[in-house]
Amino acid sequence: MTKKLGFVRCILCDIDGTLYYRGNVIPNAVETVSYLQKSGYKIVFLTNTDSRPPKEILEILLKFGFSVKSGDLFTPIIAIKEFLSQFPNKKSYFLVSERVKSEFKTFPQVTEDELPDFVVISDFSDDWRIERLNDAFKYVLKGAKLIGSQGNRYFLDQDGNPKIDTGALVRMVADAAHIKPIILGKPNSDYFKLALKKIDVDTNEVIIIGDDIESDIQGAENAGIKGILVKTGKGQKKFQKNYNSKIEPFLTLNSFSELRNLL
């Protein structure tokens, strides 16, 4: 029996692996996004990409031909900035890439002799020095709260090869310090709720579509939202052995373009 989605107003749509993969647009993804937008569906482009500033992700989507505005995009970097804005007088240590560092230039940061209130770990693959990660660990041991940009264990690079992602490094620091981190990306339910809060939509009127059974589908379940898995990107059969087989999507589609017929 075919499962029914029910009334849908908003689609939380993953980007990399769902709309494009290895530098190429998923066939008919641009046309499907356009059709859904014209049909009245609100699409929020929701990603775990923390290696680029939001404006660069927006530029990639526009270059591929997707109709998207800055307000339609939600990333871990945006979520972290919104979180830290609640604590204007608290200082942070940012373990992030050089290209993302400018996003946090207006936030108070520690000098070498200070103890931060927050340690923020995002993608820092442009400078993998273990000393940087160890500094973050020492701050957390001394009481700083650990903020991770997302919870992915690994990602697929431009050639489709798996590489360790931010979530794995955040968990390593958290386990070593014996603390629970604050994750401001998928699969944390708060990340989805923050995205929905910006557009004032209830969870029962939303679906999530993505290629990652853990960050997208488990994240959807964590937030009480129906999750649809696509068999592109990480959703390909060859990657499924890397995942918890007990996580069940509400529906599975071959690709994003099939969502047009479903809705």
Image (cartoon, rainbow, N blue to C red):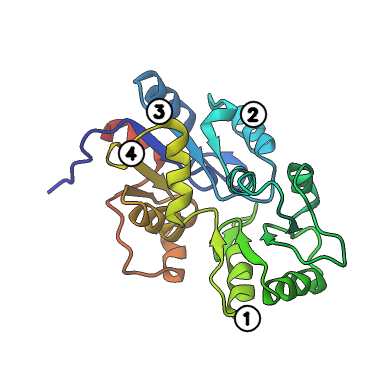
What element does badge 2 sit on? Answer: helix
User: Which image quadrant for residue 69?
Assistant: top right
Closest to the observer: 255 or 195? 195
Q: Amino acid at mark 3?
A: Lys
What residue is rendered at 54% in x and 27% in y? 66
What element does badge 1 sit on? Answer: helix
Indicate which disc, 1 or 4, sits on the residue closer to the N terminus. 1
The dot on residue 42 is 3
Looking at the image, residue 185 sits to the left or right of residue 4; the answer is: right
Judge whether residue 28 can be spotted in this image. no
- Image quarter (top left, top right, bottom left or bottom right) of the C terminus: top left
Q: Which is closer to the viewer, label 1 or label 4?
A: 1
CB contact under 8 Å: marks 1 and 4: no
Q: Amino acid at mark 2?
A: Lys
Q: CA distance from mark 4 to mark 2?
A: 27 Å
The dot on residue 63 is 2
Q: Position of residue 192 (x, y in %)?
A: 44, 47
Closest to the observer: 55 or 149? 149
